[in-house]
Amino acid sequence: QYLLLADAGTEDIVVGAILAVALSGQGQALPLQNQFEVPMKNILLVLTTTCQVDRAVEVAIDKAKNEKANLSVLFIIDASTPEGIVSKLSDFGFLGDRPSSDLTHAILKEYREQGNKKLDEIKWLADCHGIPCQTFVEEGDYTELVLKKIARFNIDYAIVSRCKRSVISSLLFGTAMDRLVSKAGCKVEIVEE
């Protein structure tokens, strides 16, 4: 028997199968025992309540289509954002001294609905291109949630977006982004607004 090894793309698999038939001398393919099966790549697209760059979606769809990869899309709701909004409204006198927690819950609910709507659009787009896609809306710390998804789904390539911000926000968000890039264990592409 002959063992053929291929290490690249589809063309190598076809050539390897043709060679296996020719080498068998009987016009029958030799069993190759899945030597050519290559697991699909896994791509993660990360969006947040405060930063949804359309170009990042395009990059993720194109990369998943070209790589024939699975696409996971994570929409992160930063729990501190609604609290910041309530605090600002209180500071400006639009709310009393003790705003209701219902307002914070209403803001979180609206963010969740916006996230689900955006994810439905991306899922539809992925389906149109024949890309396997799963979506998640989660609330919590940006870096922690992204790192958990990278580990859980064996992500090979992550696409995140960075929106224009004030200098202070850039310093704070830049730190989270730097931490993500250094701990990700996969290539992280940052798409700027």
Image (spheres, rainbow, N blue to C red):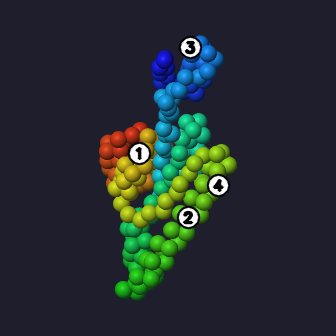
Q: Residue at x 61, y 15 (%)?
A: 26
Q: Which residue is mark 4?
A: 124
Which numbered dot is residue 154?
1
Marked residue nearer the N-terminal end (2 or 4): 2
Q: Secondary structure at mark 4?
A: helix
In the rendered image of this protein, does residue 4 appear above or below residue 35?
A: above
How far across and down, in percent of the image, does residue 75 sit? 48, 59
The 10 Å Cα crowd at callout 2, few under 14, some 14 to 19, many 20 or more, is some
Q: Which residue is mark 3?
A: 23
Marked residue nearer the N-terminal end (2 or 1): 2
Q: Residue at x 47, y 72 (%)?
A: 108
The 10 Å Cα crowd at callout 3, few under 14, some 14 to 19, many 20 or more, is some
Camera-side mark, 2 or 1? 1
Q: Secondary structure at mark 3?
A: helix
Q: Secondary structure at mark 1?
A: loop
How many discs mark residues in the rendered view? 4
Q: Which residue is mark 2?
A: 116
How far across and down, in percent of the image, does residue 169 sit? 38, 56
* Residue 193 appears in view: no
Marked residue nearer the N-terminal end (3 or 1): 3
Is 97 on the left or on the right of 17, as rendered?
left
* Residue 90 appears in view: yes
Q: Could you tell me the amino acid type at mark 4?
A: Trp
The 10 Å Cα crowd at callout 1, few under 14, some 14 to 19, many 20 or more, is some
